[in-house]
Image (tube, coloured by chain):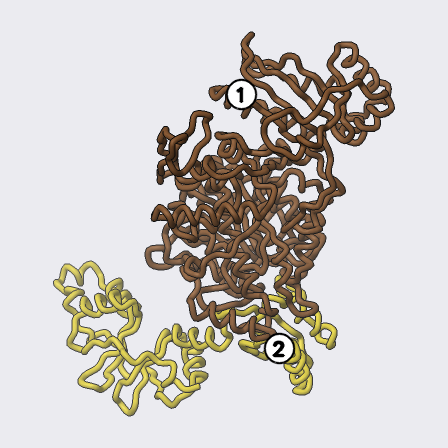
Chain colours: A yellow, B brown
Amino acid sequence: MYVGRRMTRNVITVSPEDTLARAAALMKEHRVHHLPVVAGEELAGIVTDTDVRNFTLGLTSTDRGGGIDVRDTKVGEIMTREPVTVGPWDTVEDALLILHRRRFGALPVVEGRRLVGIISKTDVLAAFIDTLCVEGIGVRIEVLVPRDANAVVRLVKTVGELEVEMKSLVLSPFRDGFVAFLRLSTIDVATVREKLRKAGFQIPELSDFLG
Amino acid sequence: MDRDLTKEAIVRGFEALIRGDRLFGADMRPDILKKSGKGVRFLIGPVPPMRTLLSRWGVLFGNRLSPDELFERLAVSIHEFNHRDNVLLCARDRFIYDTLIVHGEEPIGGLTLEFYAIPDRSAGWLGRLLRRKSLKIVYIERIHLREQSSGYASSLFRDYEKLFHNLGFNQFRLKASLSVGKYYWAKEGFDFVEKEDLDRRREGLKGLVKERNLPVKDAEIARLNHAYDIARFRKDLRISVFRDGEGYYSLSGDETHVEEFQFPLGKAYLLCAGPWDGHKIIYTNTPRRTGFVFSRDYLDHRTRAGHRESPRRLEHLMKAIQKEGLRESLVFLAPYVPERDIVEKIHLSGYLDSFRDAAAGGGRTFQTADCSISPRSYEVALLAAGGVMAGVDAVMNGRVENIFCAVRPPGHHAGRDYAMGFCFINNVSVGAVHARTVYGVERIFILDWDAHHGNGTQDIFEEDPLTYFCSIHEHPTFCFPGTGRRMERGKGKGDGFTRNVTLRPHDSDDALVEAFEGEVVPEIDRFRPDLIMISAGFDGHHGDGIAGLRLTEASYAHMTRRLCELADKHCGGKIVSVLEGGYEGPVFAASVVAHLRALQGRN
């Protein structure tokens, strides 16, 4: 999955000449925390609500007395220049890892130096929700599967024989095997569980996870 | 009245009556038996031998009370009305009570009652499930009172109803043939003995409406389900009737029917129609009168073998009702087939068509594998919605205080254009919209306590601030359908009028009661509903494997009791409860029984 499919295209931006007051107002109005700073079409930097807040709190009372007006300070003076960016053909996994490791909230998406979008933690979470099919109709069951492709085939086959619609299937490592997260569209999960147990699969009790 | 009198006590009772010249024999006169109205149906004769008396007494009254006690109870004094010259007669197959009625010293009428038993052939729609060996009948052979004394008759029969319930009698019967009686007995809750009689009256009423060009829809007439409904029909619409010198009414004036009156449509129609045989089932004196909607047709939605939502669910339930003795205390009502236009206020027409075609075309499932169907599934699903409508009718016009609709297939997962989770037509929603359009009920609170979230009902009403949908269910991460998270609180104008309360898997009664008291009860008080409806699913029971909750009957009884209190406070006790899930025969039936007892106000 590529960043281009998940990024927000209509980006709210500011120019280096805009005041902090305008930047703050834009962030409040659009409920965003990051504003790419553009000069023409080119990305010049990024300013976040944290930048604005830290700058404001960092001023001493003398500074205030000295006549610096926060509201009139220009975005260009406090923005981060040369921010970390990704391209639309980078993968979502790349974006996910950068966001996680560098503890960023959002990454501008550029082609060359031209700004084409922004990808935030929220966009990545949306991808996660879609992948797991959390919002739709369905019920999740968890099945322990040996780390063996044939066991996975048997799992899918058993579910398939019940004519139950499978909304999503995620395998993730668990101890020395997999845990399969199935999201199924049936009210009668009890029967599914029973069949899977009969087919030799282990279905953990809730208490295994609650502890 | 659970007593075990000795044979000697009963003999002594007979002897006391004989000594006081109160007991005689009687021969029924076959020539008059067949006729209606005037004339005495029996001839008084000598007292039969004691052996005969005892065996006849045993058939009807067992050893629950002695003849002199019965005599005394029948001659109850109400206000200043008393019985005089009263006698008890023993005929071949019945006992007869005959009396003069006096007010103070002044004779104002008379009363003749007959007590007998007949084989029960009248099970009809209720099916063999509820058939008894015999029906014990109190036949009101004659009641003649001056017009201003009808309040006395009502009081007397309320007293008799308790007495005869305790004696194990099943029905009052009579022939409503005298002028006002044809209307009065319907208003008192008597219904037609023959189901065909009701159909005939509906047809007659339709004819009258057509003839006089009255603003009454056929659909309104189709909903009439009981003589009582006809007696109360369209009080807002008065028509002319004409009375003759003897007090009989006619729809058209002529040389004998000269005096003109204006009466409401239903009353006028009954006054002028022919005589009818009436019966009134003797219910218990439970604190609340509770209705029960059921039809054998509900068994005709046949799901595939091994499917949880099978007709056996209702068979289990009906057997439990019989075993628990609830048959005698519930008011049984039949559903009717609703008009499509009321169902289309909830479901898209195209959706209903494709459901109909799938069932009729021999499809095995509809839309999803869960929704198993058979050829009659569409009709049965419509009848389930019609069952809730009949329940709403009975509660709104006061025939019962609250009602349980034992319908299937269930409905709460079905949305405007989708079937899922065993559900096709959203029964509770159709009932709610019926209550609103026909009875003008403004605020409706729907509590859904099925173990699964009522996503269909939520989808339908989430933008409606007048229909509060509250669901209490197992958490959607663990349980179908995966919706109904706490943050879902309604949309648009309906924001704040949807509430989802989630329980964790393995939660039991304590957790449920805490959530119910803490989160549901205050919402009902805040909303002040005009009607409370329940989507009553019982699959949260620990014995039901379909979901992970571990409730017992106590949870359902507790919620029901509290809802009755809240309904008393806000809406005159009006509750319409609709069956949803619950799949494990014995625990399902036990849970419904607990719910029904609580609806009746019993512990």
- In the picture, the quarter occupied by the C terminus of chain B is top right
Residue type at tag 2: Glu
Q: Which mark is residue A46?
A: none
Tell me the distance, in whole angstroms, between the alpha carbons under discs 2 and 1: 70 Å
Q: Is residue B109 above or below residue B527?
A: above
Q: Residue furthest top?
A: B105
Is B320 rendered above or below residue B85?
A: below
| Image quarter of residue A150 | bottom right
Query: Which residue lies at the image location 56% right of the left edge and 51% below the top edge?
Result: B536
Query: What secondary structure is found at the residue carrying circle 2?
Result: loop
B190 sits to left or right of B571: right
Q: Is residue B93 visible?
A: yes
Q: Secondary structure at mark 1?
A: strand
Does the CB distance between marks 2 and 1 fall below 8 Å?
A: no
Residue B418 x, y percent position in the rendering: 48, 68
Residue tagged 2: A163
Please provide percent x and percent y for residue B62: 79, 29
Eye-nearest disc, 2 or 1 = 1
How far across and how far down the image is residue A31, in percent?
29, 67
Residue located at (45% from left, 81% from top): A97
Q: Chain of mark 1?
A: B
Crowd class of label 1 (few under 14; some 14 to 19; many from 20; radius 10 Å): some
Instruction: Please tell me which residue lies in front, B576 or B181.
Output: B181
Q: Position of residue B281 (x, y in %)?
A: 62, 37
Residue B443 in view: no
Q: Are marks 2 and 1 on the same chain?
A: no
Q: Amino acid at mark 1?
A: Leu
Decide which of A94, B528 is in the foreground and name it: B528
Taking the view exactly as shown, the residue that stands out farthest to the front is: B255
Query: Quadrant of the image for the N terminus of chain B?
Result: top right
Q: Quadrant of residue B155?
A: top right
Residue placed under numbered mark 1 in the picture: B145
